[in-house]
C-alpha cells in the first residue's frame, strides 16, 4: 500500500438512518390569514451513492465529495383542528361529522456537496466534513367529512448547511469502509399546496414546513482510483 493511500478519485455507496424534528404550517383561513402548526418528526433509512476527489500532503488529506440518497425518512401525526376554512364552513353548514386529519411528512431524497479534511494514520483516517445539503420534502393530509375525503398535499426543496465527522479504514489498495455522523441544520420549505375539499373546487394555498435539525448516521464502501 503506497504512502499516499487517500489520494485520487473515489466512488461508493452509502446507507444510513436519520432522525429529524419537523413542523408543518398551513393557512387555514384565506381571509384572516390564520395559520395552524403541526409537529411532525420524520425518521427512517436511506441509501445512495457518492463520488469524491482527494489529495494528500503528508498525513493530511483534503478533498470534496458529492453524494445523493433515496430517503425513507417519514412520520405521521393526527390533528382535529388542522383543517382549511372551506372544510370548517362545510361542517358548520351541514352538521356533518369529521374524522381527525391524518398527516404524513416525507424526506424522499437528500443530496450533499461537502469539503473533507482528514488526518491519516496510514490506512486509517479521521476526518471532518462540511458543506451544503438539498432535501426534497413532501407533506400530505387526508380526512373524511360526512364520508367524503378531504386532502391537502405539497412538496418542495430545502437548502441547508451540513457538518459532521467520521472515520474511514482502507482494507486494501482500492477499497475502504467508512462510518460518519452528519448533521443537517434547520431549514424551511415554502410551497404551494394543492387543497381539495368537498363542495369546493381544488385551490392553491401557501404551506410552510420546517425541519429543525436532522441527525444522520451513515456507513459506506468506496472504491479508490489513484489518478495523481
Image (cartoon, rainbow, N blue to C red):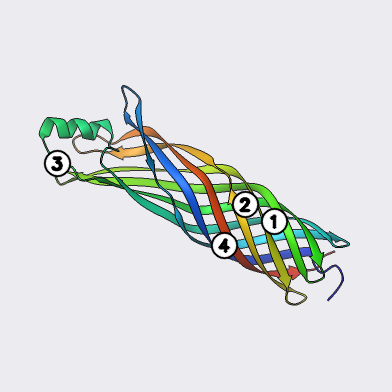
- Taking the view exactly as shown, the residue that stands out farthest to the left is 95
Q: Of helix, strand and loop, which one carries label 4?
A: strand
Quarter holding residue 61: bottom right
- In front: 226, or 165? 165
Q: How far apart are labels 2 and 4 at the CA level?
A: 11 Å
Check disc 4 and report the residue beneath it.
Answer: 48
Secondary structure of the residue carrying numbered label 1: strand
- CA–CA distance between discs 2 and 3? 46 Å
Q: CA distance from mark 1 to mark 4?
A: 13 Å
Q: Position of residue 208 (x, y in %)?
A: 43, 36
Camera-side residue of 149 and 46: 46
Secondary structure beneath disc 2? Answer: strand
Question: What is the x, y in percent for residue 2?
Answer: 86, 73
Q: Residue at x 57, y 62 (%)?
A: 48
Circle 3: element type = loop
Residue that mark 1 sits on:
65
Circles 2 and 1: CB atoms closer than 8 Å = yes
User: What label sits on residue 112 in the rendered view?
Assistant: 2
The answer to whether 223 is drawn above or below residue 183 in the figure is below
First-in-chain label (2 vs 1): 1
Specify few, some or many for label 1: CA neighbours under 10 Å numbering under 14, 14-19, or 20 or more.
many
Please identify, in this view, whether the residue under mark 3 or under mark 4 is nearer the observer. 3
Q: Which mark is residue 97?
A: 3
Residue 49 locus on image (x, y percent): 60, 62
Do the numbered discs 3 and 1 sit on residues whose CB atoms are within 8 Å? no
Asked if marks 2 and 3 touch (Cβ < 8 Å), the reply is no
Q: Earlier in the sequence, mark 3 or mark 1?
A: 1
**Where's the N terminus, which quadrant?**
bottom right
Amino acid at each position: 500500500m503506497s504512502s499516499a493511500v487517500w489520494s485520487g478519485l473515489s466512488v461508493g455507496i452509502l446507507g444510513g438512518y436519520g432522525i429529524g424534528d419537523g413542523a408543518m404550517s398551513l393557512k387555514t383561513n384565506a381571509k384572516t390569514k390564520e395559520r395552524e402548526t403541526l409537529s411532525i418528526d420524520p425518521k427512517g433509512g436511506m441509501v445512495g451513492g457518492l463520488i469524491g476527489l482527494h489529495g494528500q500532503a503528508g498525513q493530511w488529506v483534503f478533498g470534496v465529495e458529492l453524494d445523493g440518497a433515496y430517503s425513507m425518512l417519514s412520520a405521521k401525526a393526527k390533528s382535529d383542528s388542522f383543517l382549511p376554512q372551506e372544510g370548517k364552513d362545510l361542517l358548520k353548514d351541514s352538521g356533518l361529522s369529521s374524522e381527525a386529519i391524518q398527516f404524513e411528512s416525507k424526506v424522499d431524497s437528500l443530496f450533499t456537496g461537502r469539503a473533507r479534511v482528514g488526518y491519516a494514520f496510514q490506512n486509517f483516517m479521521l476526518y471532518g466534513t462540511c458543506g451544503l445539503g438539498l432535501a426534497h420534502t413532501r407533506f400530505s393530509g387526508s380526512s373524511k367529512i360526512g364520508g367524503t375525503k378531504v386532502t391537502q398535499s405539497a412538496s418542495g426543496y430545502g437548502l441547508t448547511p451540513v457538518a459532521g465527522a467520521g472515520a474511514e479504514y482502507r482494507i486494501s489498495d482500492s477499497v475502504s469502509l467508512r462510518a460518519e455522523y452528519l448533521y443537517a441544520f434547520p431549514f424551511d420549505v415554502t410551497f404551494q399546496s394543492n387543497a381539495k375539499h368537498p363542495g369546493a373546487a381544488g385551490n392553491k394555498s401557501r404551506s410552510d414546513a420546517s425541519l429543525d435539525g436532522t441527525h444522520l448516521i451513515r456507513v459506506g464502501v468506496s472504491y479508490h482510483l489513484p489518478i495523481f
